[in-house]
Amino acid sequence: MDYQPRADEVLALLRHATGVDEALAALPVFGDADPALMQQVLEEAGKFVGERIAPLTRVGDETGAQFAGGHVTMPPGFREAYQAFWQGGWPALSASPEHGGQGLPAVLECVLYEWLSAANHGWTMAPGLLHGAYECLKHHAGADLQARYLEKIATGEWLATMCLTEPHAGSDLGLVRTRAVPQLDGTYRLSGTKIFISGGEHDLSDNIVHLVLARLPDAPPGPKGLSLFVTAKVLPDGTRSKVHRERIEEKMGLHGSPTCVMRFDEATAWIVGEPGRGLAAMFVMMNSARLHVALQGIGLLDAAWQKADAYARERRQMRAPGAARSGEAADLIILHPAVRRILDTQRAWVDGARVLAYRTGIELDLAKHHPDADRRAAAERWCGFITPVLKAACTDQAFHGASECLQVFGGHGYVREWGIEQVVRDSRVAMIYEGTNEIQAIDLLSRKVLPDGGAAFCAFLADLKPAHAALAERLTALGRVAQAVATGAQASPDLPYGIAGDFLRATALALLAWGWERIGAASELAGERWTAPARALDAWILPEFEMRLCIIEGEIARAGTPAQASVT
Amino acid sequence: MDYQPRADEVLALLRHATGVDEALAALPVFGDADPALMQQVLEEAGKFVGERIAPLTRVGDETGAQFAGGHVTMPPGFREAYQAFWQGGWPALSASPEHGGQGLPAVLECVLYEWLSAANHGWTMAPGLLHGAYECLKHHAGADLQARYLEKIATGEWLATMCLTEPHAGSDLGLVRTRAVPQLDGTYRLSGTKIFISGGEHDLSDNIVHLVLARLPDAPPGPKGLSLFVTAKVLPDGTRSKVHRERIEEKMGLHGSPTCVMRFDEATAWIVGEPGRGLAAMFVMMNSARLHVALQGIGLLDAAWQKADAYARERRQMRAPGAARSGEAADLIILHPAVRRILDTQRAWVDGARVLAYRTGIELDLAKHHPDADRRAAAERWCGFITPVLKAACTDQAFHGASECLQVFGGHGYVREWGIEQVVRDSRVAMIYEGTNEIQAIDLLSRKVLPDGGAAFCAFLADLKPAHAALAERLTALGRVAQAVATGAQASPDLPYGIAGDFLRATALALLAWGWERIGAASELAGERWTAPARALDAWILPEFEMRLCIIEGEIARAGTPAQASVT
């Protein structure tokens, strides 16, 4: 079965558990975005995603993007769907009207991309980079470059790539070697090889704009020597640029998205922003990009859940304990407690994470547009702490939860027919790209929590104002552990690196419980649909919180005797 | 890199942590199997696996088994490797000399199949079913059938299948519909469709023997109406039987093993054992078959570890905290704590699970051959409790641990080149076949632990005689929880079904700690090679034990108010 967006459920969650109405009311820039408009946009988006994008997911996997002679042919139907997508105005949902955008709140774009990823992760990789490229050029490019590229990218008429990784430089972009040599006419010549370039070549749009990290001849080594450049498949004079596609990768999944090896052979390019400020320019949209990857995770998990839930309501095997006797030789497997547990657990992750992710989408707009500087600062703080947590936890759960959902199918889950194994394969990559989940954990703990001894993090936790004692205790314990790690790290600087993953995970679990407090407080979100996942959260998910704290405290206790790392 | 069996490490583990020498000394039937012979067999096996089988794993995945016109062509090199395998005497390692076997201890066969699975899971599926078919026919077939098939299967000259599953009958074999109609000449005609038949058709051997579960015309419904039959691709008179291969499945992985849909169209067959005793005949080797799947899990996890460990020793990214400054621009990633943790954690699983699995292989022989009836009964008890735990825990860890190892590669892990994503895809199926891991959990808790209120399980735990207080406390807690579940299940019969997975997992963790106590007690197993995984076990793996108990205790507390299951 194809993924079916549920606009009604998402709208209910958005309006009754995330405080979207009050938040947007404080932002005059979104004066038109009232509940009726949100409903209309989401219903139309759900229709488009369900009817045009979801049916192409299997052909995307089986046929995949095909590479021959430097050209990539996308799977049948992909180009037509993309043309309909950009002509329907979908890429530009939150871009400024002055650049051809719709000027809608970021949170609506969040929901759209969650659904697109759920429906067809491979196809969605292509437009998924537009928003970041748009913001990057909008904030850092000069007027000429903006005039040339901004509207094309805002509307999605042209697609875009981010060319960061090189064979020897993945998480460590400071090792990037691609060189940019200035020319007398103010342009640059780029030379080097970039890998893992999603959508580096395809036939979806008539041009492809490349944002490229490279090093000027006199640049210092390391990340501070990196500058950002823009080039394109087709140059302004109509000629093809010297950007060569060497091959596309054979991957575990995501076959609908061509992952290209690109060779820049003195390719003409223009600098974006200041020399040596390339990473900063590229990372201007880091929170937004990482939030979108978290939403991919939420979408993929919901897609896996939809498949498993439907299968469990038609497949019969054995008698379920406690089930009423039926005339059938066996009971529906949804009546078996182990199956029920899998389904309710994933539901708890999807819905709780949605509250957090949508709220973060709202905070992104508050950080930009709220009239009060303190409120903007609070929104920045929210996004800074929550984004790495959501990126890691949601993508981790997408893969592991999809694997749980596969298990509901038994042997049928392992074969292609039901599409569930594709979700497992596709989702795996999201734990790696846009900063591996280990990088997210270090970002949270080492860069954001520890520098002030955990003070800002504790203040952030206090602001969550939990309604229930159990969550209040967990938040207090989390803050206490953050401070203990900060203290321990003074004597053992490597302590945080070993337990950053546990700390992120404990934070994710506490936040998930907070999301479910919001759901529980909404009288509109009542009934078994919402109480069953809430029970799953308490019974089966949250006990991991104490385990993570136990691991962290054990490591703090052991940290008194640091040894120099060595290869043994 | 291809998998490299480490005969030296396995032999050291076997001899110094499993008590194999003393156990075999008590079994006169294995008089020749002294340490020198074990060493010779393992070294030769390691050589054969590393040189002949491991290099074929990638072609097995990429080319895969090809189906056309009812025939299956195996990937290049598969047939030649199989011919060398059976002609070298490897399939028959533990079969009786009277049937052409080597008569060696089962534990050596365990090690061989662990390595084969690590080296090439797909290829190994074909001979992997021989042992079960051999034991099944040896114990249940009449003299004529034995004369016709036993030596061919013991030596592996002919391969064998197990035809159990039907489209509507997976975990619930009681729903099997294939019919067997008796003929005047004493044969039967089989009609029906079987699915998920590993090796149902291929070109590895000149004949394929099929063991088929089917129902006689007058048989009662349910599992007690099932009888076991044998037929083959080529009948004794040289004609082809009416067993048709309809197609092979497109799977997530394991492409080197053809998974066939088989249609029996009044195919001539012979009954094996008594009418209505088909399941019992097929399950005679259940402990052995499940142990072998656990060993697949151990092998696949070791294969993933080998790849990640090698990559982490050549890839450099960023500065590792606490690492000595080197002349390189970045440190080896094995120096990063998060990478180290992944590697040491998987090592802890592989080596601890090896102790348990090898010991279980030894107990299988003790159960068969020990002169003392009490010792045989204790061995049976060991196998009954431990086998489902190992099957579920080792296959679960193979998939999840391989995914962790993939993460070590970053983006490179998601592409085919390094082979790690193949391990993730291949390993996933082992959580499903030979009884899903959920079935294993219910087998352990509902069928083995609870019937006597947990008494035998507690006695089994007490016999483990832990050396350290921490493990002693965990074993006591586990026994206490088993008894509490037994009590709670009286009022709430569905209680065990919701927490069987947690109970199995807690048992697995306690047993893993017991395995590591054996390693820790062996002075021959010293140094960082063994102490680093031991630290990983304590710091990062065992805290899950308390979490599982917390979940179980929560469910016991909630179980006072059972509700009838319903579809909502």
Image (cartoon, coloured by chain):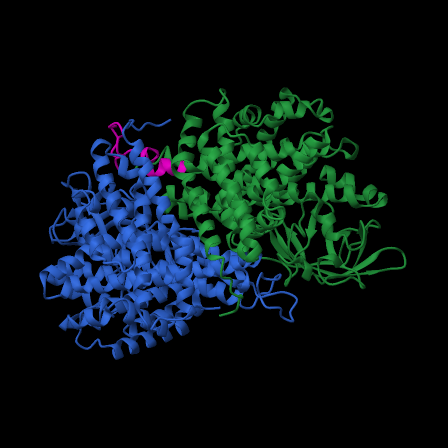
Chain colours: A blue, B green
Q: Residue at x 54, y 55 (%)?
A: B497
Counting from the top left corner in percent of width and height, residue A254 is at: 41, 57
Q: Is residue B65 above or below residue A39?
A: above
Counting from the top left corner in percent of width and height, residue B139 is at: 77, 42
Task: Tell me: B461 left or right of A108.
Answer: right
Q: Is residue B501 above or below residue A7?
A: above
Task: Tell me: B32 left or right of A376.
Answer: right
Counting from the top left corner in percent of width and height, residue A503 is at: 30, 45
Q: Residue furthest right?
A: B184
Q: Is residue A216 above or below residue B328?
A: below
Q: Nearer the viewer, residue A319 or A50?
A: A319
Q: Residue at x 67, y 57 (%)?
A: B173
Q: Is residue B327 magenta?
A: yes
Work out whether residue A245 can be spotted: no
Q: Is residue B512 magenta?
A: no
Q: Which residues are magenta?
A: B318-344
Q: Is residue B361 above or below residue B255?
A: above
Occupied quadrant, residue A442: top left
Task: Tell me: B30 left or right of A420.
Answer: right
Counting from the top left corner in percent of width and height, residue B465 is at: 54, 30
| Total residue callouts | 0
Q: Nearer the viewer, residue A2 or A492?
A: A492
Q: Nearer the viewer, residue B229 or A483?
A: A483
Q: Nearer the viewer, residue B180 or A204?
A: B180
Work out whether residue A286 can be spotted: yes
